[in-house]
Amino acid sequence: MRSILIILVFLTVSFSCSKSDSIDNSNDNSNDNSNNDNNSDEERTTFYLSSSSGNDNSNGSQSKPWKSLSKISNIEFSEGDSIFFKKGDTFTGHFKINGSGSQDKPIVITSFGSSNNKPIITGSGSNISGGDFQEAIYVNNSDNIVFEGLEIQNNRTNKKSGVKDSDSFGIYIHNSSDDIMNNFTFRNMTFKNIYAITQVDPSNQEAFNQFEVAGVRFFTDWGKAHINNVLFENNFFTDLQRFGVHVKHSNANNGLDNRHTDFVFRNNEFKEIGGTCILPSRARNVLIEDNIFNKPGAKTNSRMIGRGSAVWNWNSVNTIIQRNKAVGIRGILDSHGIHVDHKNINTFIQYNYMEDCEGGFVEILGGNETAVYRFNISVNDGWRDNPNWRNSNHTIWLNDKIGGDEGYASNNSYIYNNTIVINRTNNPYATAIDLKANNTRVFNNIFYSINGSSIGTKQVNVRDDNISMTNNLFYGNIDSRFINLDSDSIDKNPHFYNEELNNEKGYQLLKESGAINSGIPYSGRFSHPAIPTSESVIFSNVESIPTTDFFGHKLNINSTPNIGASNAKNGEIIN
């Protein structure tokens, strides 16, 4: 009997050590030299991996880490577990996360060590048997997970049985169940070097639509439950073949509104990626704010798709896109700063700065209800020269087509209090105005075109029997067909602060500006459309009705507003 008890104690201790050693759920480098391999009374468990010094036959503690992704993929995680990858190491293979956390005790996947380099997890490499994986990290029907402080890659060059050559993802969050998947956080992550084996011609619309390579992919199978409550904060995306983040649902209707819900993207940077930075598709309640979108649609790598507006949404409800900077967007089609694709309800694009976006400024496609561009600054957008589509570059483009079929006019679109500037001193260009919609309001905007460029002279085609266009300021070379649509146009110099600054600050107004107190008040047909902030907690810090302009000057709903994105009354300049 004594021998049996000794054996049982030994087995218990061995199992406890092999699962984890316990530390607090932090990423403090003070733990780097710890040798605490004892089990703790805490429920939380920890797992350590080092590709450079680990051994899969060790106990997975900080001083005796495991080595491989295959080892950690065979562990069933519990709520509160933490997985640490050693900084400076590269982990090649496939990490499948098994098990869920809880809202109070999520599973945390992060890093440890003293290196300045994040640990790299990649699903591709010459030493992988059977070809490169579809994704580096796969989450299927598990939730309540935090990703922090990792670098994710997946440059596929070797075919793999069962994986399409056109697929490659960094992290793939996949719901194939009837249960909602909740609570995912991505913080201080890097996503780069993610490519499929195949490439796509961006002018081939069908192939383009089906090509979905992404840094992070969210996807639900047909008729299955959605994904809820996702936060992206302080992440960096670069060198991606197409998408930064792609949010997609197979079936949003299915008798219910089954869209993905409550996605927040805040303070992220996207630099030189091949396509679109963020695409919410069949989503409800999305907040995209304070991000930098630097050169989407890039071709810095020949395998990049080379086309894409910084952000666009499809068949989504309540999408708020505010205080972002979108510069240098490229592409043969679309490729505006931020555009509204098909069948969306309540899209608000406000307080954004857009510059050098090849396609143009406003793009609202067919079947939308209440798409709003307000208090944005657009500088030198819409210079594209597409030989197969003469008027492919727009200052304003509202289209009534879905899938090539006409008759799906977007309703109640608002374009107001924007500052639209074309002033580059070389390569002057002309833009088009195409507007096929219903109940469109265009008011209190500055349209400013100098140095040989022009707005609307390529084409003015307006088909909206209920358009309301008034109190816009036109300065420079603006097509008269467009100006004549305005019932009370303003022909004055806006007197910008300093255009040579080449940034948003330069488009504030001096006190002699003709835009000051020249707008139409926000009442009646020109009242502010309200953001439905009560729809979700993610909008708790979003104003339903705007109370400030682009620069933070107050808006008084009872007084006459300025024209354009600045409501400064006395030449106040804000840094």
Image (cartoon, grey):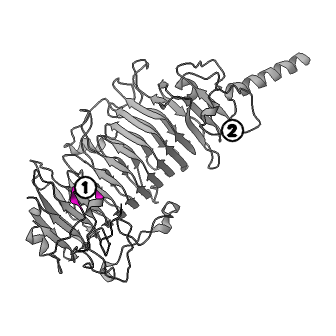
Q: Which residue is mark 2?
A: 44
Depicted 316 relative to depicted 553: above or below:
above
Residue at 17% across / 65% down in the picture?
A: 448
Of 94 and 473, which appears nearest the observer?
A: 473
Of 78 and 522, which appears nearest the observer?
A: 522
Q: Amino acid at mark 2?
A: Arg
The x and y percentages for residue 408 are 25, 64
Of 529 and 162, which appears nearest the observer?
A: 529
| The C terminus lies in quadrant | bottom left
> Which residues are drawn in magenta?
498-504
Depicted 520 relative to depicted 295: above or below:
below
Q: Is residue 351 visible?
A: yes
Alpha carbon of mark 2 to alpha carbon of mark 1: how far?
53 Å
The answer to whether residue 499 is magenta is yes
Q: Which residue is mark 1?
A: 501
Local crowd size for mark 1, using a 10 Å CA cut-off: few (<14), some (14–19), many (≥20): few
